[in-house]
C-alpha cells in the first residue's frame, strides 16, 4: 500500500480585495460628507455683492415684489425659496 499523501497547505487569502473594499468605503464616506456639507454654505453674500456693485453708490437694493432696473432690463422677484442649491 501507498502512504497517505502529505496534507496541502490552505490557499493564501488575498489581502488586496479587502484593501480595495476598504478604499471604496472610505471614498464613499468622503463623497457623502462633501455632498452633505456643500449645501450649507451661505450664498447670500455673493448675491449681495453683485447687487451693491450693480446698484451704484446712492441706490438701495429692491426688495421682494419691487421692480429693479438695470439699464434697459427690469426684474421683479416674486418669491424667495430657501434651501435650493
Image (tube, rainbow, N blue to C red):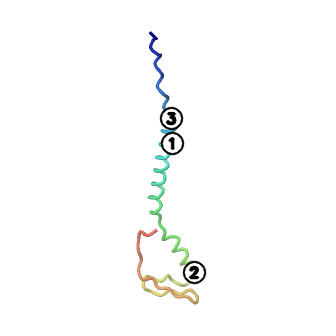
Q: Position of residue 71 (x, y in %)?
A: 58, 88
- The crowd level at tag 2 (other Cα within 10 Å; few <14, some 14-19, many 20+) is few
* Nearer to us in this view, 37 or 9: 9
Relative height, residue 19 to residue 47 (above, below): above
Residue 54 is marked as 2
The residue that mark 3 highlights is: 15
Q: Residue furthest bottom?
A: 72
- The crowd level at tag 3 (other Cα within 10 Å; few <14, some 14-19, many 20+) is few
The residue that mark 1 highlights is: 20
Camera-nearest label, 3 or 2: 3
Q: Judging from the image, what secondary structure is the residue with disc 3 in?
A: helix
Q: Judging from the image, what secondary structure is the residue with disc 2 in?
A: helix
Relative height, residue 81 to residue 7 (above, below): below
How many numbered discs sit on the rendered protein? 3
Which residue is at 46% across, 18% downward? 7
Distance from label 2 to label 1 (Cα)?
Answer: 52 Å
Where is the N terminus found, in terms of image quarters? top left
Which residue is at 57% across, 82% downward? 57
Q: Residue furthest top?
A: 1
Residue 35 is marked as none
Q: Earlier in the sequence, mark 2 or mark 1?
A: 1
Q: Residue furthest front?
A: 1
Distance from label 3 to label 2 (Cα)?
Answer: 60 Å
* Nearer to us in this view, 31 or 17: 17
Q: Position of residue 50 (x, y in %)?
A: 55, 76
Q: Earlier in the sequence, mark 3 or mark 1?
A: 3
Q: Are marks 3 and 1 in contact (CB under 8 Å)?
A: no
Relative height, residue 50 to residue 30 (above, below): below
Q: Position of residue 84 (x, y in %)?
A: 43, 70
* Nearer to us in this view, 11 or 14: 11
Relative height, residue 40 to residue 70 (above, below): above
Camera-nearest label, 2 or 1: 1
Amino acid at each position: 500500500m501507498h502512504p497517505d499523501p502529505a496534507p496541502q497547505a490552505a490557499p493564501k487569502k488575498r489581502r488586496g480585495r479587502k484593501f480595495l473594499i476598504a478604499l471604496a468605503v472610505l471614498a464613499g464616506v468622503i463623497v457623502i460628507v462633501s455632498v452633505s456639507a456643500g449645501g450649507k454654505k451661505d450664498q447670500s453674500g455673493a448675491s449681495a455683492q453683485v447687487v451693491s456693485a450693480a446698484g451704484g453708490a446712492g441706490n438701495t437694493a429692491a426688495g421682494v415684489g419691487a421692480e429693479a432696473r438695470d439699464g434697459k432690463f427690469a426684474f421683479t422677484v416674486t418669491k424667495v425659496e430657501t434651501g435650493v442649491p
